[in-house]
Image (cartoon, grey):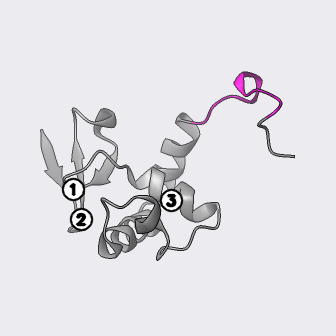
């Protein structure tokens, strides 16, 4: 079931990422946008890296995050790969 949110580009679909907030019409999570942004990718650059997204969708995802930081931070933590499973050659110093 698809459920709308107060953000026009953000929905929840129980069949996609267990109902995690996503960009409407895609399987791209708000979490993915936030993680790119936290890595220093500017909002304007994100559509170049994810060309199926428009800038308005990116900004709406960031706005959703700012309104729901605890929820999205929990999604990020839940999906984090444990350090012991990361090959030492690719770990950040």
Q: Magenta stretch? A: 80-89
Q: Estimate the x, y position of residue 47 in percent, counting from the top left.
A: 40, 67
When asked about the image quadrant of residue 36, the answer is bottom right
Label 3 and label 1: CA atoms lie apart by 16 Å
Please identify the quadrant where the N terminus is shown. Answer: top left
Q: Estimate the x, y position of residue 44 in percent, counting from the top left.
A: 46, 77
SS category of the residue bearing label 2? loop
Q: Is residue 45 above or below residue 3?
A: below
Q: Residue furthest right?
A: 93
Q: Considering only order in the chain, which callout, 1 or 3, is on the residue closer to the N terminus?
A: 1
Q: Which residue is mark 2?
A: 9
Question: In the picture provided, is 1 more to the left or to the right than 62?
Answer: left
Q: Is residue 87 above or below residue 23?
A: above
Q: Which residue is mark 3?
A: 34
Per the image, is 67 magenta?
A: no
Q: Considering only order in the chain, which callout, 3 or 2, is on the residue closer to the N terminus?
A: 2
Dot label at residue 24: 1
């Amino acid at each position: 079931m698809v459920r709308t949110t107060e953000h026009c580009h953000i929905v929840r679909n129980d069949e996609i990422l267990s109902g995690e907030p996503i960009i409407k019409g895609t399987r791209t999570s708000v979490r993915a946008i936030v993680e790119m942004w936290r890595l220093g990718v500017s909002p304007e650059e994100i559509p170049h890296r994810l060309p199926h997204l428009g800038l308005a969708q990116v900004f709406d995802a960031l706005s959703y995050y700012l309104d729901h930081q605890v929820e999205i931070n929990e999604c990020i933590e839940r999906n984090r790969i444990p350090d012991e499973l990361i090959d030492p050659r690719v770990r950040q110093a």
